[in-house]
Image: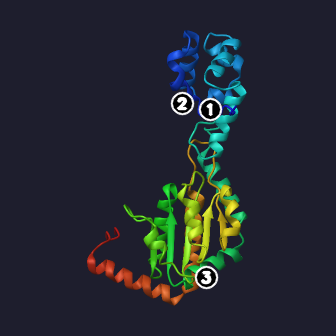
Amino acid sequence: MAKKSSPNDVLQQIEKHYASLSPSGKAIAHYLQQNPIAVLSQSTSLIAEKTATSKATVSRFFRQLGFDSHQQAKDTHVQLREQGVPVVSASSNTQQLESEIKNLSHTFEGMSMDVLKEVASLLAKANQITLIGFRNAYPIALHFRQQLKQIRTSIRLLPQPGQTLSEDIIDLGENDLVVLFGFRRRTRQFKFVLNSIKHCKTVLITDPTGQIYRDQVNHLLVCHIGSESPFDSYAAPMSLVASLCNLTYEELGEEAAKRVEAITDVYIQMDELESPRR
């Protein structure tokens, strides 16, 4: 007999089973819907007290939702957050600044300047750079392109809106550099893309879960994006992009400076940018 799969999100299970709940079960459901953090932060006894029910009723409620116990509901809630699913946790009120500083510190403490300079050298010397990012990684890849485009030529961003990847990937050669962004909750397509670019020079920018791909790329840069809040933070990847762009500028030297100057002249000619306030 196949093993019964465990449910995931408590609130989703409440919606699914709400119609079959007893009046007491509905009271517990209403309370948890209004206070989702209570699943993690409160004991079975306290939930019973808050809902004017009993410990036995609360335990029965979680079993009706498909969990073995209240503890299993807590565990699955934590597991969801670790996978990158935006859910409320017991410490969601942690100061944002503290979380960002922690992620930035862990990210840059885990990288050597020598490796960053090696990647910057590749960014400076590659015939063509292709940046690939899906879902939440796409805006970071887009920003990376915008910065690099100011200091060198031949920068591509994939996937293009409404387009498939195959036509572009087939053109990649061994002298091309591909920077692939892949943060947790990666698409199914990610593994196929990684396999299709193995003949190129490759850099993977990822979170700790992406370390399983270390042997499949030339350089792997790990960014920390997790927090106790519902959503992941991408401050560390954006900071890493800024660092790599600055190092690449230094690597290119006068060549980059001349390109920046030329682009600035075109900005002025086309009157594209707002004049600084005086």
Q: Considering only order in the chain, which callout, 3 or 2, is on the residue closer to the N terminus?
A: 2
Circle nearer the viewer, 2 or 3: 2
Res. 34 in view = no
Q: Which residue is mark 1?
A: 7
Residue 13 drawn at (x, y percent): 56, 27
Q: Considering only order in the chain, which callout, 1 or 2, is on the residue closer to the N terminus?
A: 1
Q: Secondary structure at mark 2?
A: helix
Q: Secondary structure at mark 3?
A: helix
Residue 33 drawn at (x, y percent): 53, 25
- Which quadrant is home to the C terminus? bottom left
Residue at the (58%, 64%) spot, across then down: 239
Residue at the (64%, 60%) spot, across then down: 223
Q: Considering only order in the chain, which callout, 1 or 3, is on the residue closer to the N terminus?
A: 1
Which of 102/110 is in front? 110
- Which quadrant is home to the N terminus? top right
Q: Amino acid at mark 3?
A: Ser
Which of 229/166 is in front? 166
Which of 37/141 is in front? 141
Q: Which residue is mark 3?
A: 121
> Mark 1 and mark 2 in contact (Cβ < 8 Å)?
yes
Q: Secondary structure at mark 1?
A: loop
